[in-house]
Amino acid sequence: MTASEPLSRDSLVAHLDQLLQPSRFRDYAPNGLQVEGREQVRRVITGVTASQDLLDAAVAHGADAVLVHHGYFWRNEPPVLTGWRRRRIATLLAHDISLLAYHLPLDAHPDLGNNAGLGRVLGLSAEASFGDQSIGCLASLPAPTPVGQLAATVAAALGRTPQLLGDLDRSVQRVAWCTGGAQSMFADAIAAGADLYITGEASEPCTHLARESGVVFMAAGHHATERFGVQSLAAHLASTFNIDARFVDVDNPI
């Protein structure tokens, strides 16, 4: 990464808070600055999850800040820093790197968010929202489309074959989606009139809901569906502040 003009850490946090408006959401972890690093930011690494692999990449690139979708301090998580938790925090502190995380605010942003990004690559333009905090998206296809054709489109866009549940021989026209681990919103998608629901991963009840409702469930990968927001933020920060910001993809098959 090449050096660029510095931006204050506090200005970066303030900009992202204004852009993503985390106060609008009831979330499962704190949004914004989670670990404080050096005051000046020239280089930012973005990634889906603040894993040790991502932190090691940030250290190797000389990053001043790491910006992720999945950060730390989740609700009901043990409030102790031992083992892998300690190693992650120790890496950030040893190299004076800030950690910023935005969860639901980054899913929901209408332009830079994960749902917006998934919609773009699949050619879906959200017409309505659904579900808790109105995070899910709904769109209508121009004409009824075979499930297999849509699955092929998703596989090509995300680089992995999605898991399908339900009547795979039918055609669908009303598509609902919410990225990541939003399988609990399947019933909401059914109630909203969807023929097909796309999210990141499946759980046991999804099979029965798909069979009994006639609505197809598609699990396209938690990681794969949530790469869009942090990629968009990297491009946004680079163009807005002329800092060196880049996305690092730590592959995850889930």
Image: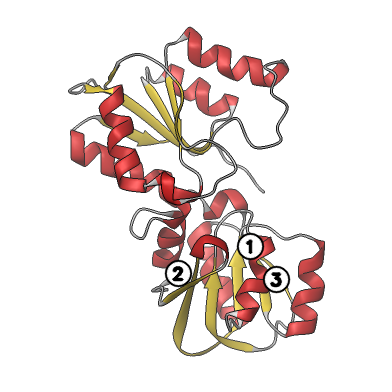
The image quadrant that residue 208 belongs to is: bottom right
Dot 3: element: strand
Check disc 3 and report the residue beneath it: 164
At a point 65% along the width and 47% down the height, the residue shown is 253
Alpha carbon distance from label 3 to label 1: 9 Å
Which is more toward the observer, 16 or 215?
16
At a point 35% along the width and 53% down the height, the residue shown is 112
Alpha carbon distance from label 2 to label 3: 17 Å
| Amino acid type at mark 3 | Leu
Check disc 2 and report the residue beneath it: 122
Check disc 1 and report the residue beneath it: 161
| Amino acid type at mark 1 | Thr
| Amino acid type at mark 2 | Leu
Q: Please, is residue 28 above or below residue 143 in the view?
A: above
Q: Does residue 135 appear in the picture of this structure?
A: no
The image quadrant that residue 53 belongs to is: top right
Q: Please, is residue 143 above or below residue 201 in the view?
A: below
Q: Label 3: few (<14), some or many (≥20) within 10 Å?
A: many
Point out the tag, 2 or 1, that comes first from the N-terminus.
Answer: 2
Which is more toward the observer, 126 or 73?
73
